[in-house]
Image (tube, rainbow, N blue to C red):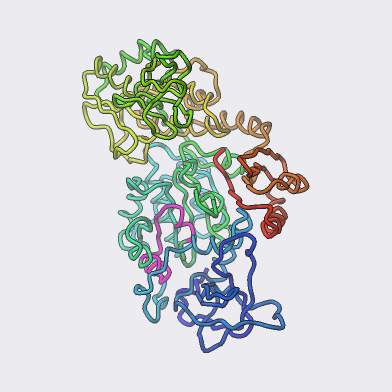
Amino acid sequence: MTSAARSPSPSILCGPVDVCVDRPVLSLDRPFTYDLDQDLGAGLGSLVQVPFHGRTVRGWVLGEAGEAPPRMLPVKRLVSPVRFFDEHLLELLRWVSERYVAPLASVIERASPPRVASEEVSGAGSSPFRAGRPAVEANASLLTAYRNGPALAATLRGGRGAFVVRPAVADVQSVAVEAVAAARASGRSAVVLVPEVDPLPATAASVLDAFGDEAILFAGGSKRSRYRTWLEIADGVYPIVVGSRPAVFAPLDELGLVYVSRESHPGHREDRSPYFHVRDVALRRARLAEGVCVMSALCPSAEAFALGLPEVAPARRSWPPVEVLTPGPEGRAPRLAAALRAASRAFVYAPLPGAGVARVCRNCGEPAACAACGGLLRAEEGSIRCVVCGADGRCAVCGSMRFGIVPGGAERVESWVSRLAGAAVRRSGVGDRPHPVADREILVGGAEVVKDLGPAALGLDVVAILDADLAARRPGLSARERALVTWMEAAAWATPSGRAIVQTRSSNDPAVQALVAGNPARFHRAELPRRTEAGFPPGAAVFRVAGSDGLARELEALAHRTLLVTSAGDETLCLLALDAQDVPAFGRSVRELAGRGVVTRVEAEPHL
């Protein structure tokens, strides 16, 4: 791919051109034709000003118009000398707009950071792309020792394809560095995508350290610094980009690798329009660039599993032995207590925060519920608060603040472990900065603690998974998968000669057995038919659509796998699952319905 943003002499257009106006609403999601004066020096990807319904608005030039209308308004002026996309990136942006039924204007805006005019210089885009000898020599020793590793290594040297990688625990960062080095050795660029950047994942830090001046972190910082970094990437200064979701659109030339780290992490799903998922966009971008997409995770998602891609995994098991115990009172199995008593470094995964849950009002005897919203009340840090709205705990019936508490949660676990352990005990919760377990320390915490912390987090004597049975009772189709992902990432911290302990009353549950085996395949084989029977199979396109009373009737007439209808006040809410081939027609219909006022909001890939 050759980006127009950094072409020495980008082509200049004139005459009728299509413009995507900066009005990100579905009812206006179509190009508008304007007359472009050659003297403006604008072309594909240029940001311009155009008249629109009596106002002056911004817009992006999409190329020559296929058909000129009898009357055209002129483009008023060129706003920026920068070309924000070329024909290859525009193809990806249009695909995202179609796949997620999102206005193209919102997709284009998300593909680059907010503009800072003072960072732009005349002649921007004239620096050459850094091809040639990489900062790190390609060494395929790790990959060639993996099943299907030689095929991945060969493809990275100049081919195209997609792979799912389940790295050995000790190889997570090294595999990413090796894959990037192989892409660079072939003269191609690479994007490494991580689900979060605070704290910086060890995989991101390893790639940045390994490639020095060739790599850049495209995440965080001020508005000015983000735009400056984007301009430098477009200018060819950095052939390796590391970042979170927006980095999937990084304007790189000769893209050879899109590497998705912790592919199953929920942070890879964008929570604002256009609601894209990094996994799908990464696959599409690699395909358009004729490069390689690598999805890496200790426990890949059901969606990745359903793709049927070649799986690259160690030839030998390096998973710690996992013991399955029946919980004792408050989850205190005797063998777990003995293991923690003897441990010098350990992690206790306690998914429930606080010290317990309020079940009954001691004043009136009614079930406990928040007086403000009816939500669950939890005892935490010495007080009782609603977990939904955060209000002080008051009975919804009588207003009393006295409740009967069912004990349980990370605070209780911390207290229990402190009484029996010989090491110091530290509890980490939401808002605390995660860091590896220190020597002579036992860490207690939930999913917020389980991060990509690198080799320093490994080598624990004991990892204990408490309350595993909660996963089956939590709402959401993906609840058990999210739990398994966290369990596997946590269990990986135990040394191969250490102990991983999971407490459950359902030892034959596929998720528990996947944890024991260190391989999620059995879980996914059970999960795919379960989710298919529920009407939302992995790989189906899912949308939540809001609108007026006639919405359900209109959507029922469209091709779909599943349609669930509910209402919230005067608004109708519909949840749909579609086969991939039906999405384009669905999108066209939804845009037409938006123009008629029947559809008011579309959310793609909602968390189920």
Residue 298 in view, yes or no: yes
Residue 321 in view, yes or no: no
| Residue at x-position 48% and y-position 44% | 263
Determine the image quadrant of residue 329.
Answer: top left
Q: Which is more toward the observer, 312 or 217?
A: 217
Image coords of residue 527 (percent x, y): 60, 31
| Residue at x-position 53% and y-position 76% | 56
Q: Which is more toward the observer, 159 or 79?
A: 79
Image coords of residue 162 (percent x, y): 56, 50
Question: Is 84 on the left or on the right of 118, as rendered?
Answer: right
Q: Residue furthest bottom?
A: 39
| Residue at x-position 33% and y-position 26% | 380
Magenta stretch: give its range.
229-249
| Count of numbered labels shown in the rendering | 0
Residue 236 in magenta stretch: yes
Determine the image quadrant of residue 400.
Answer: top left
Q: Is residue 167 above or below residue 254?
A: above
Q: Residue furthest front?
A: 398
Residue 414 in magenta stretch: no
Q: Is residue 217 above or below residue 516?
A: below
Q: Which is more toward the observer, 481 or 65?
A: 65
Q: Quadrant of the C terminus?
A: top right
Image coords of residue 533 (percent x, y): 68, 31
Image coords of residue 425 (percent x, y): 24, 25
Question: Is 21 on the left or on the right of 597, as rendered?
Answer: left
